[in-house]
């Protein structure tokens, strides 16, 4: 099979390398299977990540998807994208149930794994909303099947028949699940986002307040009901429980960022399609502070400090709701 790890992680093997030209199944060889897989790779990664909230687990799902895909007789596959989405969804559903058990024993608050995203993700408002920390936390309140159906229908606009094949249910049942999941998310989803300009202004004001330790300036940019969540995974010190309210959040932030103001650097970034601040202390990535901004005020703050969740902050991740163009096929999600 050649370098499976590279293919599963988005690498592209050349015509003369390892697996290329080796027949697998029918309808071509691994080179053909690889080309098709890479064409859809970023789309499949996005599906898996939205279902799991974990980039590491999403990559494992793609590895498993590749292992199954490479053994398929391509002549028997009428719609390759649908087939790949089906494999990915089923693998993600199995892993989602395993993740549920792992989260039960997780130390402290569990937050999704942050992704350093490319600028085009923020430009796709629906995609940015669907992968935001706030929305991923809402999706955590759904059952695995509800989450899969919601993601495939509302984010990727798949038809009910296609979703039914992916989750192993009848189309009529999928419609009911979709309706239930949509109502559940609507009751809990974040408020409507503001314009890009207002978001940038709020981020700049928040950054200045944190850098200067100006509590009043911080209070001015925090919504009255702002929520601060922290995830240290039991490895790094973090908040044991959510902090709610502008006054409490501002004081916690002031204390928590004092060391960073003395020893570290603070930089803006796009995380999960939304504005964020990245803290480095003595040259090492310490904290990713993602945020949700509504009506010009910060309504949600998500501080991820667990080192195991920060590996995808080194390079931008390319997320997609549609099939990549040929020029994108060789790009990895890292």
Image (cartoon, rainbow, N blue to C red):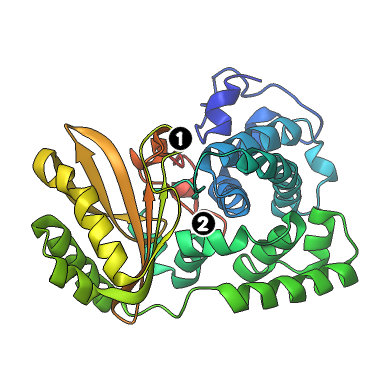
Residue located 69% across and 40% down the image: 101
Dot 2 or dot 1: first in sequence order is 1
Residue 109 locus on image (x, y percent):
50, 48
Image quadrant for the N terminus?
top right
Q: Nearer the viewer, residue 303 or 91?
A: 303
- The residue under label 2 is 320
Residue located 45% across and 65% down the image: 128
Q: Nearer the viewer, residue 283 or 152?
A: 283
The mark closer to the camera, 2 or 1, is 1
Q: CA distance from mark 2 to mark 1?
A: 32 Å
SS at mark 2? loop
Circle 1 crowding by C-alpha within 10 Å: few under 14, some 14–19, many from 20 = some
Q: Nearer the viewer, residue 85 or 289?
A: 289
144 to 262, vertically: above or below: below
248 to 6, vertically: above or below: below
Q: How many marks?
A: 2
Camera sees residue 57: yes
Residue located 61% across and 57% down the image: 140
102 to 148, vertically: above or below: above
Residue 328 locus on image (x, y percent):
45, 48
Residue 205 locus on image (x, y percent):
17, 69
> Which labelled disc corresponds to residue 234?
1
SS at mark 1? loop
Q: Nearer the viewer, residue 317 or 40?
A: 317
Image quadrant for the C terminus?
top left
State which quadrant residue 3 falls in. Answer: top right
């Amino acid at each position: 099979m050649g370098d499976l790890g590279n293919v599963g992680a988005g690498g592209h093997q050349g015509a003369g390398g390892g697996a290329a030209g080796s027949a697998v199944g029918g309808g071509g060889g691994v080179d053909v299977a690889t080309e098709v897989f890479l064409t859809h790779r970023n789309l499949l990664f996005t599906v898996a990540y939205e279902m799991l909230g974990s980039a590491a687990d999403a990559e494992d799902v793609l590895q498993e998807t590749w292992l199954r895909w490479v053994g398929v007789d391509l002549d028997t596959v009428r719609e390759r994208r649908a087939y790949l989405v089906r494999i990915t969804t089923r693998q993600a559903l199995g892993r989602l149930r395993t993740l549920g058990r792992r989260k039960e024993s997780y130390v402290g608050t569990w937050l999704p794994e942050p992704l350093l995203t490319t600028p085009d993700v923020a430009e796709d408002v629906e995609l940015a909303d669907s992968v935001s920390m706030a929305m991923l936390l809402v999706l955590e309140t759904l059952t695995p099947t509800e989450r899969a159906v919601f993601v495939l229908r509302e984010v990727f606009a798949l038809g009910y028949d296609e979703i039914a094949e992916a989750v192993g249910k009848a189309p009529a049942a999928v419609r009911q699940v979709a309706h239930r999941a949509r109502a559940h998310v609507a009751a809990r989803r974040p408020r409507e986002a503001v314009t890009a300009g207002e978001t940038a202004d709020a981020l700049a004001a928040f950054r200045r307040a944190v850098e200067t330790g100006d509590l009043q300036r911080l209070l001015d940019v925090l919504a009255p009901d702002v929520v601060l969540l922290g995830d240290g995974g039991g490895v790094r010190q973090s908040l044991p429980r959510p902090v709610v309210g502008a006054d409490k959040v501002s004081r916690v932030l002031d204390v928590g960022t004092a060391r960073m103001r003395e020893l570290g650097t603070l930089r803006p970034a796009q995380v999960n399609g939304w504005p964020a601040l990245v803290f480095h202390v003595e040259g090492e990535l310490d904290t990713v502070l993602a945020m949700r901004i509504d009506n010009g005020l910060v309504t949600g703050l998500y501080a991820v400090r667990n080192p195991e969740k920060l590996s995808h902050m080194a390079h931008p991740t390319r997320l997609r709701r549609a099939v990549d163009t040929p020029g994108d096929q060789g790009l990895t999600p890292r």
